Amino acid sequence: MVRISVVVVLSVVLVQLPLAAQSDPDILLIRIVEGEGAVYPIGSRATRGVTVQVTDETGKPVDSASVVFRLPDDGPTGTFSSGNKTDVVSTGADGRANVWGMQWNRVTGPLEVRITAAKGQARAGTVCGLYLSNTLASPEPRTAAAGGWRKHKRIWIGVGIAAGAFVGVAAVSSRGTPSVGAAASVNAPKIGTPSIIIGKP
């Protein structure tokens, strides 16, 4: 009896292992839901972060997939809240994983967050592009904006001068040229006093 029960237990375990392996997806798809193209001031901390969704080939969300977020080693970059350049997050029931709170360094320019997802033997990867800017700290954009305003101001002044000249020409023309009624009366043919001549037929 003991030998039979051991065989039954082993058979149950062997049956359950293939079923668990079959639950892993054959293909993973990873999609950026939030964060693509975000611009952060240099030296700031990310308050929005990056969110991705992992699905299988049918579009069904994949739960408990491991998602690795990696920041560049140098250039425009930063560190995650752990102080490292790599962070690992598991997807929830909706297939989503989120990372935020990155502390950015003070180097301006574009940066790419490399993202990989894995579950079982399936893998997927993508890149999320961000940008670190010194726009808020540098006077150069304001100077450029002021230069643009001065340029537009010159254009508007030129338009105003041209409009004033046009109005002046119109006023002079209106004084020097008779009106339509006056012109008609000056150039109209004149008819003299009618005369009647009586003679033989």
Image (cartoon, grey):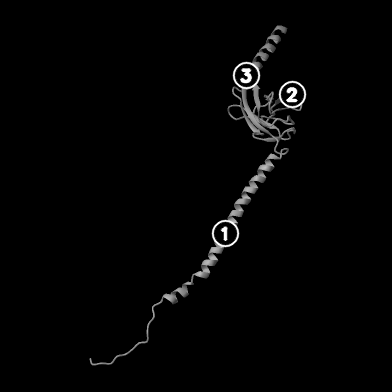
Q: Which mark is residue 121?
A: 3
Left or right of 88: which side holds 157?
Answer: left
Question: Number of numbered discs present?
Answer: 3
Q: Could you classify mark 1 by the number of other residues whose Cα lies within 10 Å: few (under 14), some (14-19), or many (20 or more)?
A: few
Is label 1 in contact with label 2 (beta carbons under 8 Å)?
no
Q: Kindly tell me whether residue 140 is visible in this rendering.
A: yes
**Mark 1 and mark 3 residues within 8 Å of each other at the beta carbon:** no
Q: Alpha-carbon neighbours of circle 3 within 10 Å: few (<14), some, or many (≥20)?
A: few
Assign a secondary structure to mark 2.
loop
Give me the C-alpha separation between circle 1 and circle 3. 74 Å
Residue underneath mark 1:
163
Q: Which residue is mark 2?
A: 84
Residue 2, x across and y down, in percent: 73, 7
Q: Where does the C terminus fall, quadrant-wise?
A: bottom left
Quadrant of the drawing holding the N terminus? top right
Residue at the image point whose x is 71% and y is 26% from the top: 89
The percent coordinates of residue 94 (x first, y second) are 67, 31
Label 1's element?
Answer: helix
Residue type (three-letter) at the residue carrying disc 1: Ala
Which amino acid lies under the numbered mark 3 shown in the image of this protein? Gln
Q: Looking at this rendering, what residue extends furthest in the top direction?
A: 3
Q: Secondary structure at mark 3?
A: loop
Of circles 2 and 3, the one toward us is 2
Marks 1 and 2: which is nearer the front? Answer: 1
Which image quadrant for residue 21? top right
> Which of these two is toward me, 12 or 153?
153
Q: Disc 2 and disc 3: Cα gap in Å?
A: 26 Å
Write the residue at 68% across / 42% down: 143
Earlier in the chain: of badge 2 and badge 3, it is 2
Task: Give the Cα distance between marks 1 and 2.
Answer: 64 Å
- Percent coordinates x, y for residue 154 in the rendering: 62, 51
